[in-house]
Amino acid sequence: MGILDIVPAGVVSGKDVYKVFDYAREHSFAIPAFNVTSSSTANAAMEAARDAKSPVILQVSNGGAAYFAGKGLSNDNQAASVAGSIAAAHFVRSVAKDYGVPVILHSDHCAKKLLPWFDGMLAADEDYFQKTGEPLFSSHMLDLSEESKEENISICVEYLKRMAKIGCWLEMEIGITGGEEDGVNNEHVHNSALYTQPEDIWDIYRAFSEITPNFSIAAAFGNVHGVYKPGNVTLQPGLLKEHQDFVREKLKTDKAKPVFLVFHGGSGSEKHEIYTAVENGVVKMNVDTDTQFAYLEGIRDFILNKKGYLMTQVGNPEGEDKPNKKFYDPRVWVREGEKTMSKRCKIAFDDLKSSGTL
């Protein structure tokens, strides 16, 4: 039995999101979550998922969503980020089923200062639910890790109550992910803040599970956004087993991994670190920095190799009267970026052992 035996292809929501993550947890694999900033990058990720025979998570960040809407738009009060998120969601929904894979449609880090963005997306979810019986997005992430634990949990609980009514999953973060991403800079955070404690996980699990089982926790175990030199950060994915054991003991359950965990800052991680995290209950890992570079590679190499055909509309190394449209047509060179990004996505499916799970 594979995932397509329990959920349909296309964007999934509600109980189907739970089924996908539960299947991943029980079969010890995780699903890569790729940040998408355009229809092109979304297509590249879904193409890779189709070829890998894996479910996939597509997510928009606050800045990525604004880019999807257009850099020419004002983002006052998060207007462009809201518009871009909604546009991205509708686009993915319109084509996802044709790729033949389950797609979890997600929004990435939302800090407290960005809550108007979250509010706009949730309002769109509720409106879509009224019309179709499901939210526009499968899930959203609240990153209130900069706030106190008490405030973090309190705000999440209030949003989770609304989200539970429409079958929308919540991912939250406790502890700090280091580095810098999308305008949030944690490069100078003290090392001790990069490791979540088991008691924190239990406090979150207890509060959220009273509302819904549809939530996951991004626990910090030394994670850093971006790519870093070996030795500059100490990942300790073995700590995640301590979280699972602590919650299991509190619940008095036989379930070895009662908590759905998330791995942030996955780009550049060692394979053994990824495997340990997955074995300890990680069901989702974010991959962004590596796929950004991979998307560039195809376009970069095409431009460098075809420079003589890209300087003018007519005239190239084959002759002064030779036209160059078939080289400068964006569908040609953008496609090269999609190919190299898709190739990198496939590595993530293999690393997380989700390939062939359909």
Image (cartoon, helix red, strand yellow):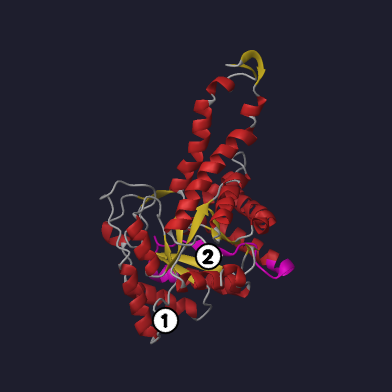
Please provide percent x and percent y for residue 224: 35, 53
Identify the disc placed on residue 341.
none
- Which amino acid is tagged 1? Lys
| Res. 75 visible in picture | no
Q: Secondary structure at mark 2?
A: loop
248 or 153, which lies in front? 248
- Asked whether, in this view, residue 139 is left or right of residue 220, the answer is right
Identify the disc placed on residue 255.
1
- Which amino acid is tagged 2? Thr
The magenta stretch spans which residues? 129-153
Q: Secondary structure at mark 1?
A: loop
Label 1 Cα neighbours within 10 Å, binned few <14 / some 14-19 / many ≥20: some
Mark 1 / mark 2, whichever is N-terminal:
1
**Residue shown at 55% from the left, 72% from the top:** 18
| Residue 23 to residue 322: above or below | below
Please provide percent x and percent y for residue 204: 42, 74
Circle 2 sits on which residue?
Answer: 357
Total numbered badges shown on the rendered structure: 2
Quadrant occupied by the C terminus: bottom right
